[in-house]
């Protein structure tokens, strides 16, 4: 399941910018529901903190949770992180700048990667009701429905995960990752990738298109991220409460989808297994090879917490962990 709306902004290195005006959706929740959500998030291992230091022997890892969209509040955080980057031997990203650019070229330049080049289009693969919802969301983004119908479902889902206001901002790529990369450039630091573009592409294309279309259909009622969702994401990010964001998103996604818990929970669990937990375990192969140096690991903040989060995996590998200022 690959289309849980604004979650892709937290988990994927998408080029977008948080210049939208919206309100924090948590303010609309009844007090008892918000308290229940906060309690559930607090029970998750390492639920808070955008900057942790993991130490084992002479190896020091600074794990920085990122938001892949820009926000003016990132400026002070970057100032505080300047000494961290200056003192590092290398910086690791999900995909570094050159690998991300190569991935984007592959997606945009190869019709068979991004488009349905043969067989039925999404209009034929989806229900009429589901497709009409998608067409309305595309119209809000000035994307012709006929064009969307020929997109691979995972590409279409990624587009719809971006609020329309993001697509019009000239500062689209200045998220935390890009800012940290610029700092690393200024110090001439090596910048590495925790995964390859091919691995990422394989993750999105492993599921047959018919199944992707069915999932897109099932979640069509909740697709089309808006400014309020993004405002909520950003607020929780700067509160450094990433586990709470995932808990909020799970509840919000189920409510918007119209699915029963029996229908929704397996899809959510599949999403977490593939896009979060599976990637974390793959990244650990590289992280554990970093030895006798100081390195920065900058990844989407949602990858830090949980039983399969990077922080817990590092603790299990013998690292001592300390939360520090962000």
Image: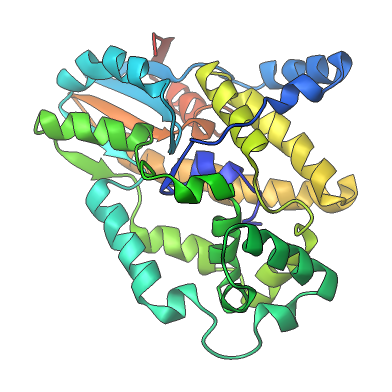
- 121 vs 21: above or below: below
- The answer to whether residue 289 shows anywhere in this view is no
Residue 287 drawn at (x, y percent):
32, 35
Write the residue at 63% across / 31% down.
22
Residue 277 drawn at (x, y percent):
55, 42
Residue 235 drawn at (x, y percent):
58, 22
Write the residue at 39% across / 39% down.
284
Q: In which quarter of the image is the N terminus?
A: bottom right
Based on the displayed image, in which of its 4 quarters is residue 231 positioned? top right
Based on the displayed image, in which of its 4 quarters is residue 45 positioned? top right
Q: How many labels, in total? A: 0
Q: Quadrant of the C terminus?
A: top left
- The answer to whether residue 236 shows anywhere in this view is yes
Q: Nearer the viewer, residue 85 or 293?
A: 85
Q: Nearer the viewer, residue 180 or 247?
A: 180
Write the residue at 55% across / 15% down.
239
Write the residue at 76% across / 63% down.
133
Q: Which of 19 and 162 is in front in this view?
A: 19
Based on the displayed image, in which of its 4 quarters is residue 200 positioned? bottom left
Residue 30 drawn at (x, y percent):
87, 19
Q: Which colour scheme is used?
A: rainbow
- 125 vs 251: above or below: below
- 2 vs 65: above or below: below
The single residue placed furthest to the left in the displayed view is 188
* Relative to 23, 27 lies left or right: right
């Amino acid at each position: 399941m690959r289309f849980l709306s604004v979650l892709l902004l937290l988990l994927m290195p998408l080029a977008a910018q948080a210049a939208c005006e919206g309100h924090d959706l948590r303010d609309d929740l009844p007090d008892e529901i918000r308290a229940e959500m906060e309690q559930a998030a607090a029970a998750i291992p390492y639920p808070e903190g955008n900057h942790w230091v993991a130490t084992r022997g002479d190896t020091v890892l600074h794990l920085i949770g990122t938001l892949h969209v820009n926000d003016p509040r990132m400026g002070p955080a970057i100032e505080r992180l300047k000494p961290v980057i200056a003192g590092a031997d290398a910086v690791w990203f999900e995909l570094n700048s050159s690998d991300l650019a190569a991935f984007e070229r592959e997606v945009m330049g190869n019709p068979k990667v991004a488009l349905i080049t043969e067989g039925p289009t999404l209009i034929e693969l989806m229900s009429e009701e589901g497709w009409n919802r998608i067409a309305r969301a595309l119209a809000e983004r000035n994307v012709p429905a006929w064009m969307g119908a020929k997109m691979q479902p995972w590409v279409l889902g990624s587009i719809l995960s971006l609020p329309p206001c993001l697509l019009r901002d000239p500062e689209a790529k200045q998220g935390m990752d890009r800012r940290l990369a610029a700092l690393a450039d200024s110090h001439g630091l090596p910048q590495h990738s925790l995964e390859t573009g091919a691995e990422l592409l394989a993750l999105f294309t492993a599921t047959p298109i018919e199944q992707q279309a069915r999932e897109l259909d099932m979640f069509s009622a909740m697709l089309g991220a808006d400014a309020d969702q993004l405002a909520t994401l950003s607020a929780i990010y700067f509160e450094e409460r990433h586990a709470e964001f995932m808990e909020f998103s799970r509840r919000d996604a189920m409510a918007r989808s119209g699915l029963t818990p029996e229908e929704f929970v397996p899809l959510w669990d599949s999403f977490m297994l593939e896009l979060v937990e599976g990637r974390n375990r793959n990244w650990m192969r590289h992280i554990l090879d970093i030895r006798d140096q100081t390195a920065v690991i900058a990844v989407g903040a949602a990858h830090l917490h949980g039983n399969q989060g990077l922080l817990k995996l590092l603790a299990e590998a013998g690292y001592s962990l300390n939360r520090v200022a962000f």
